[in-house]
Every structure is written in C-alpha cells, then in structure tokens.
Amino acid sequence: MKKQVKILIAGDLCMQDRTACVDFDTLLQIHQSCVPIIKSADYALVNLECAVAEKEVTPIKKAGIALRNSTKVLDFLQYIGFDAVTLANNHFADYGDRGVVYSLQELKKRNIDYVGGGHDIKEASKVLIKRIGERRVAFINACEHEFTIATEKKAGCNPLNPISLYYDILNAKQQSDNVIVIIHGGHEHYQLPTPRMQEMYRFFIDVGADVVVNHHQHCYSGYEIYAGHPIFYGLGNFSFDENGQRNCSWNEGYLLNLLIGETISFELIPYRQNDKDMGVYLQSEDERAQFEHRIEELNVIIASPSKLRECAARMMEKRRREYMEPLAPYQYPRLLKIAQYHLIPSKLAAKLLPNYMTEERMLMLKSYFQCESHVEVMNKLLEND
C-alpha cells in the first residue's frame, strides 16, 4: 500500500498595491504565519494571477485591468514553500506572447513547476504529472474563455473545454494514481457556484477526477462530497492586495490541505489577507468559528438544487444593469429616441450621431459573449425578459 501524500492548493496570488512596494524581507515577514503550513506539504501549488513581465512590455487590449509582477513574485512564492503554479486564469497572458514567454522562462530558471499555460495550446493543455512520495499525481488546469486563451499560434492559457478535459482526465487516469482538476472560473464576488458549474465539475468526477478545485471569484466558497470525491467551489485570494477592498469577502480565503492515499481527506485552513494590515494571517479561534459556520451555510445551499438556482438567479438579476448597458446603443435618452424612432434620415444620422460602438464597448461585449460565466448571465437575463 502506497503512503499518503499531503498536497496543498492555494488561491490567487498577485503582488500589487501595498505588497508590490515593500522589500523582500518585509514581504516574507507579513506572510510568515502561513509558511510552516505550506512547507509541511509534500507538494504545494498556488495560482499565479498575473504575468511576470518587464516594465516596457505593452499589455493586450481587453476588458478589465492588466496585471503584471516583477520576478520578485516568483522568488517570494518559491521561498515560502510553493513548488508549482497554476497559470490558466484571466490575467496570465495580459502582456501577450512576450509576457507569457518571459514568465515561463523565469519559472523554468527557478525549477518551479507550472500547468495550464504555455507557448501555444499544445503546451498550455499539457497535464502535469508528478511523482510525490510513492504516488503519481496528475494536475489538470484550465480557465474560462476571456482574453488569455492560447491557440496554435498564440501563447496563453488552457481553455475550459469539457470535451478536451474529458479526454485529458481519461488519459491522466491511466498514467497516475490520482487526478486533480483545478479550474479558474465563476462569478467574481459571488460566494457560490452556479448550477452550470456544479454540473460540469460533477461531470469531471464522473469521468475520473479524484478532486476538483475552483478559484477566481476573489472570495471563498463551500464544498461538497460528490460520489465520494470532494469538489471545492472557491478558495478565495491567497495574497492579493487591492486598494478599496477592506473588511470584506475579498480579504478572506483558505488553504486547502489534501491528504491523498487509498482515500482522500482534507483540511481547510482559513486566514485573512491584506486587510487593514498587509500580509496573510491565520484566523483566530473566534474568526475560525465564524468561518466554519459560514462554510456550513454555503454547503447547505450547494446541497440543494432549488436553493442554488434561486441564489444564482438573484445574483444575476442584481447584475442586470451591468450586463445590459453595453447592449444599449446610446446612454442618453434623447440620442436613443432619435436612433429608435428614425427622427432624422439615416444618412444624416450617420453623420450627426456619435458612434456608440466604441473599442471599450466592443471588448466588453467580446468578454460577455465568450466567457462561460458571462454567457450564463446574459442568457438568464434575456430569458427573463
């Protein structure tokens, strides 16, 4: 019988705002409470939520911000005990092919393993199989479609394609003892999966995954045991400082400790990150009790299909204006009436009315009609209408 191994998985890491400005010793000091936990694992992974790129590199055109770190982030994560990074996310390719190539070069230079990103789709979709102790463990990493997806000619991330992942899981199962699928997706600042996510992640278990883990929402979520295997729907940020995000769900997360052998057990280790104070700090006993209570509340909803649908529907309805505004041709009522009711001849309108299809709006619409979570919201709102 093969011995158990301990695998630790953490959420989103990006050194920005306050943490980008401090020296290396300070950076280590403000994260020191979690270092023994990370280093106690046989293998530890964290999601690198940015490109590692030189200052002069130009970001790609996309909806949303572009994130970039210096090589200090790699030295930091390696020093505190991480062995590997997941790269499939909506920011890894923010600085185009040049940023991806430089990031991979610097990871290789430090012997840091990576999965989910590459010079092209072939490399980005490659499964990472590691011998950890006496076990061979396969890691599969993919993200929803935004602006960072790799192609045959473009560097970037492994896309969330259920058909491709189906075959990846089957092949990985033949070559390893265990398969862990890590997905970057979901709805930002929403502490639950949607029914679509649950159905897909359960499918990955059905075809052979032993564990499914999700991150991206910038807040933690609950979990469920499906067919004897755990699915974790959100780890939250690991270390991601953001000006204006204080004393809220952004500042909480948990490290996931998996103990994998003939059976799989796990431990959630909650912390607060980059709140009033910089860094990652393990929660106090009172805070942990509140965390465990909240996890139980989330798990109850996850276990109920009707409650999960209701919560998702309310979330989407609250975001109606955000999603519908880019579809309106004009934001000003008078311009909208002129366009709607043809109050002036079309040729004259083309000259007098401003072009409402700006580059910013086009990029936003591209995101809304490509990203699985955005498509989910659009379909629901249009269905309700």
Image (tube, helix red, strand yellow):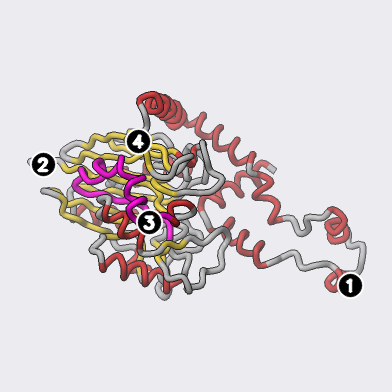
Left or right: where 364 falls relative to 26 = right
- Helix, strand or loop at label 3? It is loop
Residue 49 can be seen in this image: yes
The residue mark sitting in front, 3 or 2, is: 3
- Helix, strand or loop at label 2? It is loop
Amino acid tagged 3: Asp
Q: Which mark is residue 282?
A: 4
Amino acid tagged 2: Lys
The residue at the point 50 percent across, 33 percent down is: 308
Q: Position of residue 328 (x, y in %)?
A: 74, 55
Residue that mark 2 sits on: 3
The reply to whether dot 3 and dot 4 touch (C-beta < 8 Å) is no
Residue in the foreground of this view, choosing between 110 and 255: 110
Q: Measure the C-alpha gap from mark 3 to mark 1.
A: 60 Å
Residue that mark 1 sits on: 348
Which residues lie in the magenta part? 22-50
The residue at the point 37 percent across, 68 percent down is: 121
Q: Measure the C-alpha gap from mark 3 to mark 4.
A: 22 Å
The residue mark sitting in front, 1 or 4, is: 4
On screen, 198 above or below 103?
A: above
- Placement of the C terminus among the 4 image quadrants: top right
Amino acid tagged 4: Leu
Residue that mark 3 sits on: 23
On screen, 82 above or below 346?
A: above
- Please tell me which of labels 3 and 1 falls first in the chain: 3
Residue 167 can be seen in this image: no
- Please tell me which of labels 3 and 2 falls first in the chain: 2
- Please tell me which of labels 2 and 4 falls first in the chain: 2
- Helix, strand or loop at label 1? It is helix
